[in-house]
Image (cartoon, grey):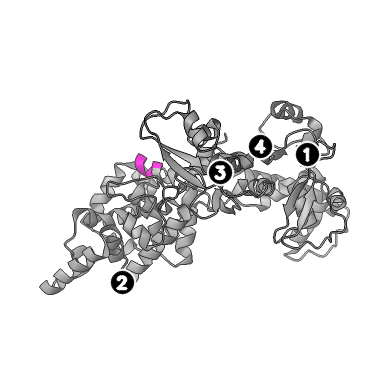
Amino acid sequence: MLPNALKSSIPGALAASGRALALLLAAALAGCQSQTSTPPEPTQPVRESANLMQMLPQEDVWLMEAAETPAPQDIWIRVREGFRFQEHLDNNPRVEQQRLFFAGRAKSIEAASVRGAPYIHYIVESLEEQGMPLELALLPIIESAYDPFAYSPSQAVGLWQFIPSTARNFNLRQTNWYDGRRDITASTHAALRYLNYLHGLFNGDWLLALAAYNAGEGTISRAIERNQKLGLPTDYWNLSLPRETRDYVPKLLALSQLVLSPQAYGINLNPIADEPYFEAIALQQQVELAQIAKLADLEEEELYQLNPAFTRRITQDGPQQLLVPSEKAEMLMANLALMKPQEPVKWQQYRVRAGDTLGSIANSHSVSVSVIRDINRLTDDRLRIGQTLNIPGSDGQALHVVRHAEPVRSYRVKAGDNLWDIAKSQRVSVRDLQRWNGLSGSSLQVGQTLHLQDSGTSVSASGKRTPTYYQVKPGDSLHRIAKQFNIRINHLKSWNPGESEALKPGQTLTLYLAK
């Protein structure tokens, strides 16, 4: 893997090589012109570069494209630019105490920042949309160390550490299958709504709002009333509060100062791209995270980190959507389009009793032993009394519907790769690799993504290829659908005679896909 510094230098090097090539060509052309040519306007070299780009051989165009695509900015730069609490840092002994505390725990802050990398861009975007201070993006470091699975003795859960009662007040559903406090997007929306509510309740004072987020609005209101009766100041710094709440705001302020100048405190904040890490993909039916992970070519644990609210890794009781890494979204949508609609599975829980076996439980619920074993991730058939098992209420076949779809896999080209070696390792033919990826030759680029399918032709008992049905979505075109499924437009037209090229959302097309 290339070091970050080297990675960041590559686009500049490519740009320089592209400009040098263009200048050489420009010099050659200029030598054929008259010595008395009128000097070009200031914008002329840009127009000439565009024309020269068209004159270059096709394989050199990617050099120019690489030069035009700047690397995304580090999200920490954006966070610092949105700080608004810095006036509270000067000569404050309570902040200084917490600053020293955090400075001695640099590794913990670094670990929390790495753990929060998939989530922080979404949180920063949400804060900016509502005009809120970006110091609040650091609050999950204090609350949960950016761990969506964090659980406290007071039953607070998730990135934002909602207790059950507060979660219910902000419509975060909690069932045996889904806990909205662990939902990345839902809990973020709820936390920002709560913070905005507290900000308004305490007359626009963010420090009092933060204290109330920690201790509850009643605790802060009573502390203010006590000071009012005694004729004392009622700002955060002068209130008599529980020790945890006295330290809570100084912790956030101290942490913001460390993020503002991490090198001064020996902290190495890993750069995080200022771009969305995930996308929300709509689901039409209940699914297992394990099966969606296969369709998206993901590790199941990575998918679970983005969707921790589905506590049993089955999309029941929560919103019918999943968060997936942005780079995998298109592949997953293509594979989900191949899934046939199924009746939803009615799930139930079964508590193991004395004398139970997997076979007896499976028979009593009309499911197979393998289904129960797979759902509950059992490595063998041993059970313990009191153990809770998840059981599908139907015959269990709908649970495995995802396996009927043919996954579109992907392979990222590495240094030294060639088509023959890739085809051999993936157990496909070179010809299929070329066909699936529109390759006319054998040249590859490091980092290029190749799409793979299962080789062979799908045929039914009658000898005809088995059709797949695709429902047109808004923005679809024949070209886009053909590209998505690696098929030719003329084939798509021949499979759908009489269908207009002006597609309409909801229209159904027939596709015959190689498996």
The quadrant of the rendering that contains the C terminus is top right
Q: Which mark is residue 201?
A: 2
Q: Quadrant of residue 514?
A: top right
Q: Residue furthest front?
A: 364
Disc 1 target residue: 514
Name which residue type carries label 4: Arg
Label 4 – label 3 distance at C-alpha:
40 Å
Q: Is residue 500 left or right of residue 10?
A: right
Q: Quadrant of residue 413?
A: top right
Q: Amino acid at mark 3?
A: Ser
The mark closer to the camera, 4 or 3, is 3
Label 2 and label 4: CA atoms lie apart by: 52 Å
**Is mark 1 in CB contact (under 8 Å) with mark 4?**
no
Residue 378 appears in view: no
Q: Which residue is mark 3?
A: 394
For label 2, the crowd category at 10 Å Cα-Cα, with few meaning under 14, some 14 to 19 and many 20 or more, is: some
| 108 is within the stretch colored magenta | yes
Mark 1 or 2: in front is 1
Q: Tell me the number on the disc at residue 412.
A: 4
The residue mark sitting in front, 1 or 4, is 1
Q: Earlier in the sequence, mark 4 or mark 3?
A: 3
Highlighted magenta segment, given as a residue range: 107-111
